[in-house]
Image (cartoon, rainbow, N blue to C red):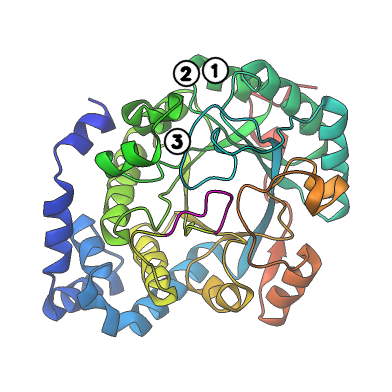
């Protein structure tokens, strides 16, 4: 059985209606369970419901306590590095969309090394490799990029097009530690509206990509939805459902959730459903109480003020000084088209100082190639 089959057994409208009907009594019952470390999908529905909004302070306290208990007062730092903005998909919310008339660029091995050098100078040891989805940036290109960067970084993650199991296995043998495949939206009809052309238009192929990642033995799998395309409460439920399925099936892997909200970009799509700052905090806390082992990421899409307050409530990793254009670290922000606008423009050093002033330790390295037997012998 695949997760696509599981997903098909749930009605979006029924899930959303169930969440909307939750009461204060339901929330209080789940909070009592959470105090004892218990939380299932029904509790999760209670925590993301409108009825939970008056209890946000208690949710935040529990989420903070659970995070410190498991991860301590630490935040892992990472950087996204865009290697290509070439893309054959049309995605209504993305600056790299094939319909946008912009200059395209794919970094050469030499340019990739320059980006890596610039990131090392900033202190990063964990990087996330990103590209558009194009035949020009397939598995051979990814292998070349990994081979360029692997000797210089503790861990390498990727957010690229969904691949086959054997492709992920090849990339793992070249030092890939983590793969992130965000579904964007779990609402199938809305997904089709926002992905009218390209391989990404295949909803089911993307939906089952995390299963293929797990089958390939990748150490960490990242999930998430782009908040703004559909109702955030239902998106969170389906993400939690997906997480639960994957964790039971691929129990040797770790898991990560990110919380991107729709940001300005070349296409300038406006959110269908707004998600407020308080609601984003509610989602973060709900996921932490649902899964105490889960890694939660907060990116530079969010504002300085929001990140300075929200990171204590369940977050385990943050990006800083991000550039969303190929060549952006070595050559500057204007080197090429950005995928979306950055909100928190602080340098890594500035973010690290903020964390330190709040009693948190900045973790630049918590993984090493020798931990991964499949890559330990790779040069």
What label does residue 350 carry, if any? none
Q: CA distance from mark 1 to mark 3?
A: 19 Å
Residue at 41% x, 80% y is 61
Check the image and name the residue furthest to the front: 101
What label does residue 252 carry, if any? 3
The residue indicated by pointer 2 is 164
Horizontal and vertical percent for residue 327?
80, 42
**Looking at the picture, does residue 270 appear above or below residue 23?**
above
Task: Indicate the secondary structure of the residue bearing disc 3.
Answer: loop
Horizontal and vertical percent for residue 216?
48, 23
Residue sitting nearer the eye, 285 or 17: 17
Horizontal and vertical percent for residue 336?
76, 43
Instruction: Please indicate whether residue 217 sits to the left or right of residue 158 in the image.
Output: left
Image quadrant assignment for residue 63: bottom left
Task: Indicate the secondary structure of the residue bearing disc 1.
Answer: helix
Instruction: Confirm whether the magenta stretch covers residue 269.
Output: yes
Instruction: Confirm whether the magenta stretch covers residue 153.
Output: no
Q: Which residues are magenta?
A: 264-270
Q: CA distance from mark 3 to mark 2?
A: 19 Å
- Quadrant where the N terminus lies? top left
């Amino acid at each position: 059985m695949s997760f696509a089959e599981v997903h098909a057994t749930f009605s979006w409208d029924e899930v959303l209606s169930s969440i909307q009907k939750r009461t204060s009594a339901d929330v209080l019952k789940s909070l009592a369970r959470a105090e004892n470390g218990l939380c299932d999908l029904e509790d999760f529905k209670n925590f993301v419901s409108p009825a939970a909004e008056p209890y946000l302070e208690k949710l935040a306290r529990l989420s903070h306590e659970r995070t410190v208990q498991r991860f301590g007062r630490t935040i892992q730092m990472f950087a996204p590095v865009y290697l290509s903005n070439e893309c054959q998909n049309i995605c209504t919310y993305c600056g790299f969309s094939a319909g946008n008339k912009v200059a395209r660029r794919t970094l050469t091995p030499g340019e990739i090394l320059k980006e890596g050098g610039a990131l090392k100078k900033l202190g990063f040891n964990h990087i996330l490799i990103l590209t558009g989805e194009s035949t020009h940036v397939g598995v051979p290109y990814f292998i070349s990029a990994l081979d360029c960067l692997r000797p210089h970084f503790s861990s390498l993650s990727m957010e690229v097009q969904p691949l086959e199991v054997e492709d992920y296995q090849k990339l793992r043998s070249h030092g890939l530690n983590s793969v992130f495949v965000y579904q964007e939206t779990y609402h199938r009809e809305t997904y089709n509206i926002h992905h009218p052309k390209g391989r990404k238009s295949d909803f089911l192929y993307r939906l089952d990509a995390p299963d293929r990642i797990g089958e390939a033995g990748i150490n960490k799998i990242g999930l998430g939805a782009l908040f703004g395309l559909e109702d955030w409460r239902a998106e969170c439920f389906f993400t939690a459902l997906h997480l639960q399925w994957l964790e039971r099936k691929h129990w040797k892997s770790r898991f990560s959730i990110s919380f991107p909200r729709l940001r300005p970009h070349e296409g300038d799509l406006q959110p269908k459903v707004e998600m407020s700052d308080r609601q984003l905090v509610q989602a973060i806390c709900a996921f932490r109480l649902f899964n105490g082992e889960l890694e939660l990421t907060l990116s530079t899409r969010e504002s300085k003020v929001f990140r300075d307050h929200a990171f204590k409530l369940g977050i385990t990793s943050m990006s800083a000084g991000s550039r969303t254009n190929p060549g952006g670290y070595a050559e500057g922000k204007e080197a090429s088209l950005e995928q979306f606008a950055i909100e928190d423009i602080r340098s890594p050093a500035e973010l690290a100082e903020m964390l330190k002033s709040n009693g948190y330790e900045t973790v630049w390295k918590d993984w090493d190639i020798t931990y991964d037997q499949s890559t330990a012998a790779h040069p």
